[in-house]
Image (cartoon, rainbow, N blue to C red):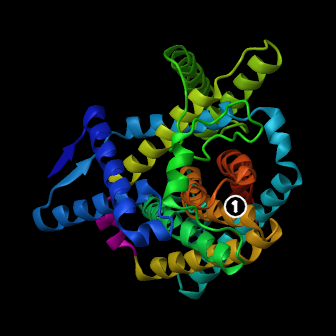
């Protein structure tokens, strides 16, 4: 029997999951030591409980997909609204190098998936589905390409296969990023952990929005000083971004400019912010954007993990699990020996490696959550928070789509 939660019950459940995750991370030293994000910790417990209830009593819960999508779009819009061109230029050559690193990884990811599929005697396209289509691409790309693989390439069950693989990636991406970064930081003595007193003092000190060191999303628990007027104005900006995203999704459908809705939400934020600031000299309230963006990030991740049906993963064939296991190892090794090294082999590079694990196996929200878990323990990394959100949310989808289409053109 399936129970459907409407938007209100879904929101209540997500908040409970977040509070549970915060409690677990604060009380279980292992989770705190290895920088497991709070939404991941609470969401996995909720998913396991859901699995047990389904296994023993046959009950399952379906949450509000519309609400989950709304929070995801608000998060991506907040990235766009935080991206003024002056800050983007601060990324400098590091942004270009990181883009090259993730582009190469997408090719590596698909090579591993398709090669293993052929060695295991299954269709190479299944390896592509268990490659960048679902891991770098996430659930949105999995859904879009799943139908294409079923109708045009005859891969039966490609949509279910894709969703299961994306689910696996979302979980693993949130698990391996923190421990990997911690290993790199300790191995090369890049930073010392902050004490609980230092963390508490930092969180309770309002962040100076005028500081040149201010970077959105970096410290989600830090106090932000905003007013009702700021909040209302910012909500209007978010509404404009989401309206733009909805319009452009419909307008660009079946054209060469067709992009996922969340990419249009981010692009709308970038355009809106820089037009208002650059042309009309309107002040943008970064503090309010930061608050709404971080809240949406946490709620989206909680809802995504809350909606997991782990029993669907049990239906994955043995060969697919072999491929996904190999992809996990490949991601960890690439982040440690390529991403970390080409980005400078320093503390920022370690945080970037954690972020790469997040969107290389799961999604951009997971990448941001991974980095927040690291910076909360070891201190700020402005470079990582300038580079990863925009790369993971915008450029990586364009690069991924190009690689997938090229593979289908020359190898199918």
388 in relation to 169, above or below: above
- SS class, disc 1: helix
Circle 1 Cα neighbour tier, 10 Å, few/some/many (<14 / 14–19 / ≥20): many
On screen, residue 179 versus residue 381, left or right, reads left
Q: Report the residue that reaches farthest toward the left.
A: 57
**Between 303 and 313, the one nearer to me in the picture:** 303
Looking at the image, how many numbered discs can be counted on the residues?
1
Which residue matches tag 1?
352
**Between 27 and 199, the one nearer to me in the picture:** 199
Magenta highlight range: 308-316
State the residue at coordinates (60%, 21%).
237
Q: Does the magenta run of residues contain 389?
A: no
Quarter of the image for residue 177 reads bottom right
Residue 10 in the image: x percent, y percent? 29, 40
Quarter of the image for residue 266 reads top right
State the residue at coordinates (67%, 28%).
268
Residue 38 in the image: x percent, y percent? 42, 56
Residue 375 in the image: x percent, y percent? 61, 57
User: In this view of the protein, can residue 143 be seen by the observer?
Assistant: no
Residue 53 in the image: x percent, y percent? 17, 62
314 in relation to 16, above or below: below
State the residue at coordinates (57%, 63%).
135
User: In this view of the protein, can residue 115 be seen by the observer?
Assistant: yes
**Between 321 and 78, the one nearer to me in the picture:** 78
Tell me the quadrant of the picture where the C terminus can be found. bottom right
């Amino acid at each position: 029997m399936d129970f459907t939660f409407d938007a209100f019950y879904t929101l209540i459940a997500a908040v409970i999951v977040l509070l549970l995750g915060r409690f677990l991370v604060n009380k279980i030293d292992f989770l705190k030591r290895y920088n497991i994000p709070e939404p991941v910790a609470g969401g996995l417990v909720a998913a396991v409980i859901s699995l047990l209830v389904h296994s023993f009593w046959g009950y399952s819960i379906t949450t509000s997909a519309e609400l989950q999508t709304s929070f995801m779009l608000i998060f991506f819009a907040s990235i766009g609204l935080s991206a003024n061109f002056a800050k983007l230029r601060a990324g400098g050559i590091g942004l270009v190098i990181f883009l090259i690193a993730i582009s190469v990884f997408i090719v590596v990811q698909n090579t591993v998936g398709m090669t293993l599929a052929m060695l295991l005697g299954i269709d190479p396209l299944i390896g592509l589905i268990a490659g960048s289509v679902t891991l770098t691409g996430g659930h949105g790309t999995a859904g879009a390409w799943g139908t294409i693989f079923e109708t045009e390439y005859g891969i039966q069950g490609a949509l279910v296969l894709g969703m299961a693989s994306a689910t696996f990636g979302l979980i693993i991406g949130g698990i391996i990023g923190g421990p990997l970064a911690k290993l790199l930081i300790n191995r090369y003595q890049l930073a010392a952990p902050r004490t609980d007193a230092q963390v508490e003092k930092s969180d309770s000190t309002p962040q100076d929005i005028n500081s040149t060191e201010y970077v959105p999303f970096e410290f989600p628990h830090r106090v932000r000083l905003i007013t009702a007027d700021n909040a209302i104005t910012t909500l209007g900006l978010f509404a404009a971004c989401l309206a733009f995203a909805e319009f452009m999704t419909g307008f660009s459908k079946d054209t060469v400019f067709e992009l996922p809705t969340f990419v249009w939400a981010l692009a709308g934020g970038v355009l809106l912010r820089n037009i208002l600031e650059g042309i009309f000299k309107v002040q943008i309230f970064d503090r309010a954007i930061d608050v709404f963006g971080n809240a949406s990030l946490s709620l989206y991740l909680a809802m995504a993990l809350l909606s997991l049906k782990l029993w669907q993963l049990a239906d994955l064939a043995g060969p697919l699990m072999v491929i996904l296991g190999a992809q996990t190892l490949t991601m960890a090794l690439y982040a440690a020996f390529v991403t970390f090294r080409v980005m400078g082999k320093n503390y920022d590079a370690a945080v970037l490696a954690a972020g790469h694990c997040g969107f290389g196996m799961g999604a951009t929200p997971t990448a941001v959550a991974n980095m927040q878990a690291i910076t909360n323990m070891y201190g700020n990394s402005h470079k990582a928070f300038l580079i990863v959100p925009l790369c993971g949310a915008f450029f990586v989808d364009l690069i991924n789509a190009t690689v997938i289409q090229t593979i289908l053109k020359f190898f199918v």
